[in-house]
Amino acid sequence: MEWSDVRIFLAVAREGSLGGAARALGVSHPTVARRIAALERAMDQALFQRHKDGVLLTEAGARVVRLAEDMEASALAIHRRLAGEPGKPNGPLRISAADWFATYVLAPVIEALIHEHPGILPELVVSARRYDLSRREADIVFRVVPFEEPGVVQCRLLRVAYGLYAREGEPVPVRGDGRGARLVLMDTSAHAYPEVEWLREMLPHARTVVVSNHRALQARLCQRGIGLAVLPRAVGDATSGLVRIDLGEPPPSRHVWMGNHEDMRDMDRVRALADIALRMLGDAEGDPRS
């Protein structure tokens, strides 16, 4: 069984259709259909049951999935190891970070990386999605929660301070009440944000008017007087027309964590960025690693 066939088989199993697998892999629908048919002939087993909305795994297919995932893990490990071999820092480096962090904090780090290592091409993936380091969806990731995924080397960077912001001239709400105030909140459907719970405790009677997972957008909405917003101070303090409101205690702060897969620790491009990030964004309280 060839890895190329296993890759297509897993895509079909995960997407639930031949068309979905073709789109995910960037190949044609007939190619996927032909390779699956050839794989089923070679194994003398039906791996999928076709239906009008797509495909379902047969019992034989479900047994094959577990073995295919083991093969995939080995193939990905080989790819990471080869990519992580030391050499001259040169080539693309895929970096994942939240929109606000990339824009307001990471930009000087990227500037230093380009200046010190002109052969490296940073590829910034700005998204709230958590990219899979084991699949090399990103080479290095910055985020505000520690990594729990196996095989990830991580480092704690700076502590991020947050503030409650309003448009200049807006009335200051009363702590413990909040009647008449409107809120622009982070979307908590996928991830928890402690500053959201803090704000609801501080202003229990305020009305939520917008929910968004994009900090820069929240700042712009706050700037237009749509509502109050808790923002990283790097964002709020840099946005004209906003003032920070003091309710007696600040929103909870959070650390930024930098992580990469252990197989990539010797990749010169990863080490180059990690060294610069530690130098420029290192935690004043120390540099604990795991």
Image (cartoon, rainbow, N blue to C red):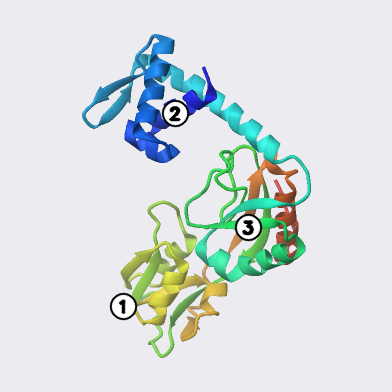
Question: Residue 8's mark?
Answer: 2
SS at circle 2: helix
Return the residue at label 1: 179
Q: Could you say which quadrant of the image residue 200 lies in?
A: bottom left
* Farthest left residue in view: 52
Total marks in image: 3
For the residues labelled 1 and 2, the Cα–Cα distance comes to 56 Å
Is residue 182 left or right of 279 when viewed as pictured? Answer: left
Relative to residue 250, is residue 255 depicted above or below? above
Of circles 3 and 1, the one toward us is: 3
Return the residue at label 3: 122
Q: Is residue 72 visible?
A: yes
Q: Quadrant of the C terminus?
A: top right
Residue 158 in the image: x percent, y percent? Answer: 66, 64
Q: Earlier in the sequence, mark 3 or mark 1?
A: 3
Relative to residue 282, is residue 58 depicted above or below? above
Packing grade of label 2 (10 A; few <14, some 14-19, many >=20) is many
SS at circle 3: strand
Q: Residue at x 58, y 71 (%)?
A: 104
Residue 220 in the image: x percent, y percent? Answer: 42, 76
Q: Nearer the viewer, residue 169 or 261?
A: 261
* Farthest right residue in view: 87
Of circles 1 and 2, the one toward us is: 2
Is residue 187 left or right of 272 when viewed as pictured? Answer: left
The amino acid sitting under disc 3 is: Pro
For the residues labelled 2 and 3, the Cα–Cα distance comes to 30 Å
For the residues labelled 3 and 1, the Cα–Cα distance comes to 47 Å
